[in-house]
Image (spheres, helix red, strand yellow):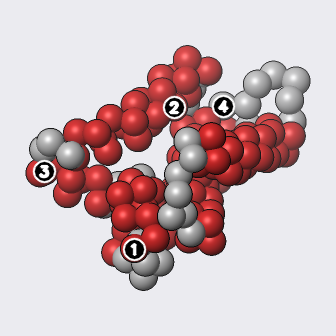
Amino acid sequence: MILSGVKQGEYITTVIIFPIIFSLVASILIPIMMQIEDMEWGKFLVVVSLTSLVFILLNLLFAFLAKNQTQTTVCSLTLVLVASILPVSSEFVKSANTVMEYSFIGANAKYFKELSDYQLTDKTIFVLLSWIVMTSIALYFAYKKNRKID
C-alpha cells in the first residue's frame, strides 16, 4: 500500500526509520522510568532491538499486502493486541506459554521474567532470529509482487 504522492522509497524509509527511533527510545526509557534493577543493558538491547525489528518487518509486510490503509491498521492493531495479551495469558494458560515461546515476543517476555539470568543462547533468541528470516523472506516476495502491480 503506497499512498498517492509518496514515492516508494520515501514510504519505506518512513515506515522503517521512525519506528526504529521510537522503539529504541521507548526501550531505553521504559526500564529507567519503571526503575527496573538487575538489568543487563547489553542483553536487553539485543532482545528489544530484534523484537522491534520483527514488529517493523511485520508492519511493513502488512503495508505491502494490504489493499488500503484500513486493512493495514487492522492488521497492525491485531499484532499489538497479540503482543500485549500473549505474555499475560501465558502466565495462566500452559498452551499460551508454548505459543509465546515460539512467537516474536517470546524472547522479550522471557528476558523480563529472568532479567540477569537470561542467556542470549536461549531458545527464544533463535526463535526470534527465525522470525526475522521468515518475515524478511515474505517481505521480499511481497515487495516483488507490489513492484509488478505498480
Report the residue marked by disc 4. Answer: 1
Crowd rating for badge 3 (residues with CA inside 10 Å; few <14, some 14–19, many 20+): few
Pick the residue in front: 79 or 60.
79
Q: Nearer the viewer, mark 3 or mark 1?
A: 1
- In the rendered image, the residue lying farthest to the left is 94
Mark nearer the viewer, 1 or 4:
1
Q: Nearer the viewer, mark 2 or mark 1?
A: 1
- Nearer-N-terminus badge (4/3): 4
Q: Disc 4 to disc 3, how far (Cα)? A: 35 Å
Q: Considering only vertical position in the picture, is 67 above or below 53?
A: above
- Tags 2 and 1 in contact by the CB under 8 Å rule? no
* Residue type highlighted by circle 4: Met
Q: Of tags 4 and 2, which is closer to the observer?
A: 2
Residue shown at the point (12%, 44%) measured from the top left = 93
Q: Quadrant of residue 121?
A: bottom left
Residue type at numbered disc 3: Ser
Residue under pointer 2 = 76
Look at label 2 and name its amino acid.
Answer: Ser
Q: Is residue 91 above or below residue 51?
A: above
Q: Earlier in the sequence, mark 2 or mark 1?
A: 2
Q: Earlier in the sequence, mark 3 or mark 1?
A: 3
Image location (x, y in percent) of residue 8? 81, 40
In this rendered view, identify the residue nearer to me: 83 or 79: 83
* Residue 26 x %, y %: 67, 42
Disc 4 is placed on an element classified as loop
* Numbered disc 2: secondary structure: helix
* SS under mark 3: helix
Assess whether mark 2 and mark 4 are in contact (beta carbons under 8 angstroms).
no
- Which amino acid is tagged 1? Asp
- Badge 4 crowding class, 10 Å Cα cut-off, few under 14, some 14 to 19, many 20 or more, is some
Residue under label 3, please give it: 95
Q: Which residue is mark 1?
A: 117
